[in-house]
Image: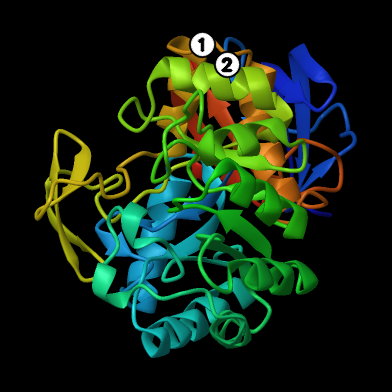
Amino acid sequence: MADRKVLAGARVVLPAGVVDSGRVVVEGRRIAGGAPADAPTLDLSGHWVVPGFVDMHNHGGGGASFTSGTVEDVLRGVHTHRLHGTTTVVASTVTGDMDFLAHRAGLLSELAEQGDIAGVHFEGPFISPCRKGAHSEALLRHPDPAEVRKLLDAARGQARMVTLATELPGGLDSVRLLAEHGVIAAIGHTDATYEQTVAAIEAGATVATHLFNAMPALGHRAPGPIAALLEDERVTVELINDGTHLHPAALELAFRHAGSGRVAFITDAMDAAGFGDGTYHLGPLAVEVRAGVARLVEGGSIAGSTLTLDTAFQRAATVDRLPVEAIVRAISANPAKLLGLYDRVGSLEPGKDADLVVLDGEFALAGVMRKGEWVVEPHPG
C-alpha cells in the first residue's frame, strides 16, 4: 500500500477556487481523491497549500549555472530552487557559440529525460544587438531556421522554448519552424515594431520573454511590441516580479490587459539566486551582484535576477495585492499549460504529481513537497 499523507486545515487553492480548512491527500507520488479516517494527518491550520511553482525561464542558482556548469552544478541549481518552491524548472541558456550551445543542449536533455528538469529554453543567440541586455554581442546571429533546427536536434525533443528577435532576417520562418515542432517561439530581446510583432504572433509566436524588459518602451505613436503582446489573447507574457525589473504599475498594467490567465511569473535567475552577492559570470560576461541586484561589470546592464519564486509569490500577495488564485495561475498553472505539463503539474488535482508548497499566513514559504516527498518539511505550531 502506497504511503498516505493527509494535509488538513489549510486554505487550499484549487482550480475552482480557495477551499477553507481544506484537505490534500497524498498517496505515494501523487495526489489522491481520498484517504481512510486513520491516515496520518498533518494539521496546517493558518497556512496555505498551493501547487508547486513552475519556472519556465531560469538560468541557475545556488552558485551554479545552467549554461556552463557541470551536471552536478545544474542539479545543485535545481535543488536550490526546489528549496524555494519551484518543483518544476526549465533550464535556460544564454547566448554562446552554436557548437557550444548544441553540446550544452545534449547535456541538459539528458537531465530532462531523467526528470530533473522540464526541458531547455534557448535565450539567444538569435536576438537583437540593440536589445542584447546581458548577452555577448560578438556571439549574436540572425535566426537562420537551419541553425534553429540544429539546436532543436541537439536537444533531442527536450527543447521547450526559443527566445528570438523575430524582426531579424529569418525570424518569421524560424517562428514557423518552432511552431511546427511544438516548441514555444518567444519574442524577446527585440527591437520590433508593433506591426512586426503582430506578424510574428500570426506566424505562431505565443510568449513574450520578460515583458517590458529588453524591448522598446510603450509609445503613443509607436506602440512597439508591448502593445501587440498585451492585446493578443494567444500570447502569454512573462513577468519578473522582483521589484527591480518592473515597477508595480507595470505589473498591474500587464495583469489588467492580459488577465491572470495570460501571465507567467518567472525568475530569469542566474547563479547568485539563493547564494548571495559577489562576482559571477553569465555566459562569457562578468556580473557583479550587490544587494541582490545583478548587473554586468562592464556597462551596468541588468543581468538576470537573484529572484526565487517564493519571493515573487509573497511580493505579489503583499505588495501588489493580487488575489491568491491569480498568483497561483501565474506561477503554476499557466506555465504548466504552456509547457504541455498540465496533465501532471500546475494544480492540486487527484492523479497529478504531489507537487505543492505550504505558505504561512504572511505568504512566507513553510514547506515544499515534490512527488510526494518533503523537500522542505513544514513544522506548524
Q: Give 48 or 140, whichever is nearer the viewer.
A: 140
Left or right: where does residue 67 sit relative to residue 185?
left
In x, y percent, where is residue 271?
A: 28, 56
- Front position in the image: 158 or 304: 304
Residue 93 picture location, percent across and down:
42, 67
Q: How many marks?
A: 2
Q: Secondary structure at mark 2?
A: loop
Q: State the separation of the CA atoms marked 1 and 2.
A: 5 Å
Point 52% across, 45% down: residue: 86
SS label for mark 1: loop
Image location of residue 142, percent across then percent down: 46, 74
Residue 265 position (above or below residue 335): above
Q: Amino acid at mark 1?
A: Gly
- 332 versus 379 height, above or below: below
Rate crowding at label 1 as few (under 14), some (14 to 19) or many (20 or more) other CA atoms within 10 Å: some
Residue of label 2: 47
Are the residues flagged by discs 1 and 2 in contact, CB closer than 8 Å? yes
* Residue depicted at 50% across the width and 76% down the height: 108
Q: Is residue 3 visible?
A: no
Residue 22 seen: yes
Which quadrant is home to the N terminus?
bottom right
**Which residue bears the numbered disc 1?**
361
